Image: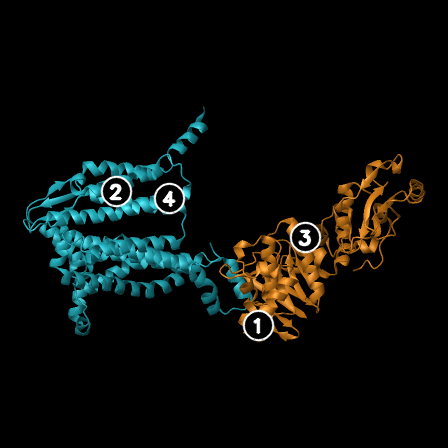
Chain colours: A orange, B cyan
Amino acid sequence: MIELHGLTKLYDDARVVDDVSLTVDQGEFCVLIGPSGCGKSTTLKMINRLVPLTSGRILLHGEDVAALPAEQLRRRIGYAIQSIGLFPHWTVAQNIAVVPTLLKWPKARIADRVEELLALLRLDADGFRDKYPHELSGGQAQRVGVARALAADPDVMLMDEPFGALDPITREVLQAELARVHHETGKTIVFVTHDMDEALKLATRIAVMNEGRLVQYDRPIELLFSPADDFVRDFLGKADLGLKLLTRRWVHQYVAPAPWADRRASMGSLRDIVATHGHVWLVDGDGRPEGLFGARLWRAEGDPLGELSRIHPDWLATPEMTMKEALSRMVWRRVLALPVVDADGRLSGEVTMAGVMGRQPEGAAA
Amino acid sequence: MDAAGAADRRRRWVADRVLLTLWIAGAAAAPLLPFAGLARNRLVSAAPVELAAALLPWQAWTAAGLAALLLVAAVASPLPRRLAEGLVLAAAGGLLVLLLAAVGDYAGRAVSPEAPAARVALGSAFWVLLFCCTLALINAFQRLRAGLAPQVLFALAMTAAVAALFALGHFDALSIMREYANRSDAFGSELLTHLRLVGSALLPALALGLPLGLWAWRRPAVRTGLFGLLNVFQTIPSIALFALLVAPLSALGDAVPALKALGVKGIGAAPAVIALVIYALLPVVRNTYAGFAGVPPAAIEAARGMGMTPRQVLWRVELPLALPVILSGLRIVTVQAIGLTVVAALIGAGGLGTFIFQGLGQYAIDLVLLGAIPTIVLAVAADFLLQILVALSRPKGAR
């Protein structure tokens, strides 16, 4: 648990951080967000005392961080930054082992921990352990950066725009990985970004900052439904608020039973299903969706059995996918429904355009 | 057909323009310039001896064969690139050793019992050919993008070949070696003095320069003033700086007898070492500064953020990453100090410069060479060794 009390930072009379107080509970994913120069990074760096504070108090598990020598404090807190800062003269394994080495762990324990973390970040240990940073792609390097921050198993992690320099695709993948790591490890994370989509995707709580002040500190859904003032509303982006809302909705909240038939089913039985539901999913012997009759966006009229659409891998939705992504796939592929598949690729239901429009899902305030 | 086609054809006809240029220079020098000079004794001036006259028939044919190989490699090489460069290395290396052996042999034949006082000096064609062969070797290594190991092996092989020629007495009859024979004791001691002067200038330069460079990096305010001051020193001509130090140091030595007992006086080693340190300081400080400035700031932030103490950040992150650049600075000042120490002979500090200035006074070119050639060999050897050190210090991860 991290408590900030009246945190203030002055640089030559400029109030970079102005009386910020907030509490991050154990296991929370707290995202500090705001425009550049709003003081979010400075706030983060005051927690591990990379930036000395002018006034205020920071408590980590109820203990004032000023009570410890700065180096000891930092070894207890994971730290990852945008430019990653891997040590170019050390291998991946040595980079990950920095803090355990500083803490003088025995060699065997360090080696085990490195293996464990490479596995957690989905880096093949034999392939990556002895590589040097210049041999890694941006995404791989930041995986190592995150692994390094996790190395000594700190219960608090500070991350300063860690995915800011990555290309959009890699960033999405790593966001998903971080969400998974957070879920699996239950770490308390304080994460700085200026990207609202990233914040909405990852955060359990969002702290919006502007001109050094904390403007609103709320759960993502509350932020979307009741922004504290015009600044927050503007920062959320008026135009795509609806889409932003869908980044906090998941396919499993919208999934409905899917009309389906075996691919060898007779035309007559297919016609019956289509008559009731408007479309039908064809599945193979293992229950994997293979094709779709009807429900294409541009063939809403005419005989729905006139054309069989072979299912493109891009169509498939998984229960953990955000509704924003599911909707995006529908629009891109011009279909009115996506099949939802389980981990084995078997059809478990469907999400439809009508479903997105139709209702607020249960348990939406997640 | 068109410009691109013509360029393509030209590229195919001249495989290596540098090598071709060197070959033409060498081929022009060989018949036009004297290969050696023959004098009846030390006092009369030498008569030029042409290459054709100096070489034995087998040597001439071998040299011509090697030269033909080099021409093939330079022009329309039908060979794969690596093989061609390997051929150049073998041919140019062989030619180099052959020339050295041949000029020694010729001297041995010229200085016969009938003419024991005869002197054989090295002629300009010899130097041009030596120069062309060396450049061809360097060029071949660069085109091969060879790593350090093959270069070291090749340098060792060449050194061994030349050392063997020395040991077999091939060079004994050359006038420069006879100058050496006359002064071998003095040569040994001056060589040692030279090395001692270089060493005693480099150690304080490093001891002062490394902290100053770090200081300049940590405190931007210090940088401008420090670099300005060191730049001023660097612009003073060396001979003037040596001379400028004479008066204050002799005054100091007279005023403080204890210092005088330690060797601080107007002439000799003290002003030489001080001047050399001053010259060495700028490259050391500047490269130390540049080395630290080149460390990625993100690595430093990460190191601090993960709980390294300032000392750990310096020793584990900053210094290893700055080391290659710092050692490059050391390489520059070492080569520079070996050269500058020659001038120190003028203020009585000794060293190989002694022979050069003696030789200049007596108009004895061989004596000048006795000082100059070992200086060059020392500088090249130091440069090569430090280059190896720089390469070894470069972390595997930072290309």
Please state the horizontal and vertical placement of residue A291, each as a whole percent of the image.
Answer: 82, 43
Q: Locate the N terminus of chain B and report the quarter of the image it occupies.
A: top left
Please state the horizontal and vertical placement of residue A344, each as a whole percent of the image.
Answer: 78, 55
| For residue B257, above or below residue A333 | below
Q: Do marks 1 and 3 both belong to one polypeptide chain?
A: yes
Q: Chain of mark 1?
A: A
- Give the Cα distance between marks 1 and 3: 34 Å
According to the picture, the residue beneath numbered tag 2 turns out to be B62
- Give the Cα distance between marks 2 and 3: 69 Å
According to the picture, the residue beneath numbered tag 3 turns out to be A172
According to the picture, the residue beneath numbered tag 1 turns out to be A108
Left or right: residue A357 versus residue B286 is: right
Amino acid under label 3? Glu
- Give the Cα distance between marks 3 and 4: 50 Å
Q: How many marks?
A: 4
Q: Do marks 2 and 1 both belong to one polypeptide chain?
A: no
